[in-house]
Image (cartoon, grey):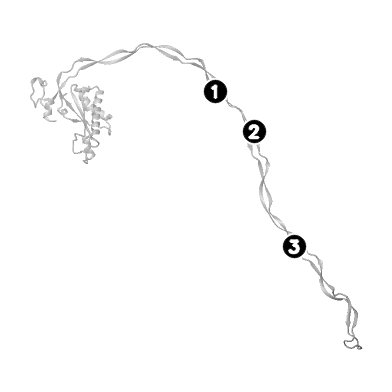
Amino acid sequence: MSKRFLFSLFACFALYSIAAQDLPPNPEPGKCYVRCTTPDVYETVQKTVLAKPVYNRLAVKPAQYRTVEETILVKPASKRYVYVPAKYRTITREIRVEDPYNAINIIPAQFASSTERIETRPKSAGWEYQAAGTDCYTGDCEVLCYVERPAEYRTVPVQTLANGPSTTTTQRGGRTITVEVEEIVEAARVEEVEIPAEYRTITKKVLVSDETVEEIQVPAEYATVTTENLASKGGLKVWEEIDCKLTDYNVLPILYEFGSARLTSASRRIIDDKLYALMRDKSNISVEITSHTDARGSASGNLSLSERRAQSVVNYLVNKGISRSRLVAKGFGETRLKNRCRDGVDCAESEHAINRRTEFRVINK
C-alpha cells in the first residue's frame, strides 16, 4: 500500500506528525493504528408477549358408523355350452379310379369247300333251217325242222358258309388305389354345463350418528421475543492498534465452486481463522472485502460473479454476529488483473489462478 494511502487512513507514529489531539494515546514506534468510530452497544433482552389470545375453536365431531357384512350376488347362475367334436377311426379302402371296359374280339365267318352244277344255257326248242339232202340242189330245197336243244350245265367249285361271323368280349383296363379314410364313430354333440352363481361378502359402514359441531377452548399462546436495548451510545473516535500488513490488500485463500458464489466448508474455516477472529478481537475496526476473477468469460458476467462472491463472505460474517455496518463488499471482475492474462492472451491455468482471488483490508470507515 502507498504511503499516501496510509497517511489518509492511519496514524503511524514513526512517519507522520499529527496534531496532538488526533494522535493515539501512548503510541509505540513502528506500530500502525486505525481511527475507528465506536459502534452502539446493545444488550439482549428476552420478553414474553401474547402471541395468540384464548379463543373457542369449532370442531366437527365426525359421523359414527358401524361395520356390517353383506353377501351380494356378483354374477348370476348361467349355462355354458361345450361343443364336443365327433370321433373318428381310420380305415383303409380300395377305390376304383379307372373303370374296366369289354374289349370285342371278332371271329370271322367259316366256309366249306363244295361244287355247284350251274346251268349255263337253259333248255330250248325252235324251228331251224337245216341243209337238204343229196337229192336237192343247192338253193332248191329248204328244210325247216323243229329242234329241241337240251340245257347246258357246268360244275364250278364254290364255298358254303359253315359258320357265320361272331364276336367274343374280354374285360380289360380298370385301376384301383388304396386310401386311408376316416369314418365317424361318434357324432359331434353339444353338452350343457351349469355355471353356478357367484357371491361376494362386502363390508359396509352403516351410519349410526351424523356429524356434529362442538366448541373447544384453545388456550392462549405466548412467544419469547429477543430484543436489543441500547446499552451505550457509540460514535466515539478511538484508535485501534493493528498489524500494518492489514492496511493493504491481503489474499483470503478461499476457493469457490465453478461459476458459484457458495462458500464451501473449507472456505468457511479459512474465513473463521483469518477474518472472523480478527474482527471479533478488534471490535471497532471495519473491513473491505474484494473479489476478482480471471479474464475468461464475459466482463459483465465476471463482474456480477465477483460481486456475489464478495457479498457471500460478508453474509457469512454477519450470520456469525459481525455487524453489517463494519463490512464493505466490492466486486471488480476482471478489471484488476495481476498479470498479463487479458482477453486473447494464451496463459497457463496457474497464471489464470493468480487473478482469481478474494482479498480483504482494514479500512478507516
Q: Are marks 2 and 1 in contact (CB under 8 Å)?
A: no
Q: For the residue carrying disc 3, how many other residues have a C-alpha within 10 Å: few (<14), some (14-19), or many (20+)? A: few
Q: Which residue does the image show at 66% across and 43% down from the upper left?
A: 88
Q: For the residue carrying disc 2, how many other residues have a C-alpha within 10 Å: few (<14), some (14-19), or many (20+)? A: few
Q: Which residue is mark 3?
A: 105
Q: For the residue carrying disc 1, how many other residues have a C-alpha within 10 Å: few (<14), some (14-19), or many (20+)? A: few
In the foreground, 111 or 347: 111
Q: Amino acid at mark 3?
A: Asn
* Secondary-structure class at tag 3: strand
Q: Which mark is residue 145?
A: none
The reply to whether residue 31 is in sight is no
Which of the image's four quarters has the C terminus? top left
Q: Quote the CA–CA distance across marks 1 and 3.
A: 98 Å
Q: Which mark is residue 192?
A: 2
In the image, which is nearer the foreground, mark 1 or mark 3? 3
Q: Is residue 133 above or below residue 231?
A: below
Where is residue 314 shown, x and y percent of the image? Answer: 23, 26
In-image side of 65 versus 249 (left or right) = right
Q: Amino acid at mark 2?
A: Glu
Q: Give the quadrant of residue 335.
A: top left
Q: Is residue 9 above or below residue 62?
A: below
Q: Earlier in the sequence, mark 2 or mark 1?
A: 2
In the foreground, 137 or 196: 137
Q: Which residue does the image show at 63% across and 37% down from the upper left?
A: 83
Q: Are marks 1 and 3 in contact (CB under 8 Å)?
A: no
Q: Which residue is mark 1?
A: 202
Q: Earlier in the sequence, mark 1 or mark 3?
A: 3
Q: Are marks 3 and 2 in contact (CB under 8 Å)?
A: no
Where is residue 358 shown, x and y percent of the image? Answer: 22, 31
Where is residue 167 shown, x and y percent of the image? Answer: 77, 62
